[in-house]
Image (spheres, rainbow, N blue to C red):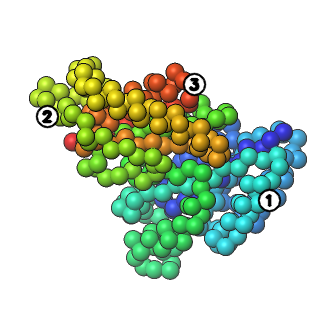
Amino acid sequence: MTLQLTIITGLSGSGKRTVAKVFEDLGYFCVDNLPTALIPKFVELCKRTQDNITKALLVIDARERHFLTQFTPIYEELKFQEGIETRLMFLEASDEALQRRFSETRRPHPLYETTDNLLEAVRIEKKLLSPIRDLADIVVDTSNHTVHTLRRYFVDLFSATDNVGMSLTLMSFGFKHGLPLAIDLLFDLRFLPNPHFVPHLKQLTGKHTEVIDFMMKEPEVNETIEKLLNLLEFLIPKYEKEGRSYLTVGFGCTGGQHRSVLIAETIAKRLLLEGYKVRVAHRDIGKE
């Protein structure tokens, strides 16, 4: 029987405890802050137990003093071990978001003892963890999430996607609100006609019928959809062949209200009809 092992790591304050609770609710056997050297022993016990543990989750981070030096070789060995499917998830957030969270909770940063400056501690940890971030199968930026929206995000992502096959996330966003940090492919849609400049469409979004009708009358919109869809249909099997479990595709326009929303929604519906596992996230819809 194959053991599905998920390891969550990342920056302090990025929401690892919240995400671990989601996996616990999904039936995973979860352990927080396990000493890094005990990971192989933990895996061995899970495989030998009579309790039929098939899904397990570990949360390991900078709190464990040997994490930075011991984790990489142990993880790379696990990736090639028979009878275990291992995925590594890395959570991160912007400097501003992490500062705010530590200020609100009044909890000390794990590296605070190395410096009396919180921002410096955050940046030191980012630099120290960058090699481990590069190993991750999925990177999630939690900057714009609350505890509740982060939980919803992972429930939507994993409750229906723990089966075989790659999970796709199509994300709309607005360039004026900044680039998403955790995307694999990015498409700039600012060349398309902009409903923002049509008075009766300005306050609507790409989900509204009026905006859809306006956009779909333009030949270049339909042509763009077809070309993007053809490209994704070509690329997705290539990523799957490389063993990717998750792929996030970003569609950007100026404000993240009209063009990017419509394109993401339309392509998602087409991919769903083709049997792909797809979720849509509109990062900036509703923002000014």
Identified by mark 1, the residue type is Pro
Q: Are marks 2 and 1 in contact (CB under 8 Å)?
A: no
CA–CA distance in space, label 2 to label 1: 59 Å
User: Which residue corresponds to mark 3?
Assistant: 275
Residue 207 in the image, given as x and y percentages of width and height: 31, 26
Mark on residue 192? none
Of the numbered discs 2 and 1, the one sitting upstream in the chain is 1
Whether residue 15 sits left or right of residue 1 in the image: it is left
Q: Residues within 10 Å of mark 2 (few under 14, many from 20)?
A: few
Give the number of the mark in front: 1 or 3.
Answer: 3
Q: Residue at x 76, y 60 (%)?
A: 77
Q: Residues within 10 Å of mark 3 (few under 14, many from 20)?
A: few
User: Which residue corresponds to mark 1?
Assistant: 40
Residue 15 in the image, given as x and y percentages of width and height: 50, 52
Identified by mark 2, the residue type is Phe
SS of the residue under disc 3: loop
Q: Residue at x 74, y 46 (%)?
A: 85
Of the numbered discs 1 and 3, the one sitting upstream in the chain is 1
User: Which residue corresponds to mark 2?
Assistant: 197
Dividing the picture into quadrants, the one containing residue 53 is: top right
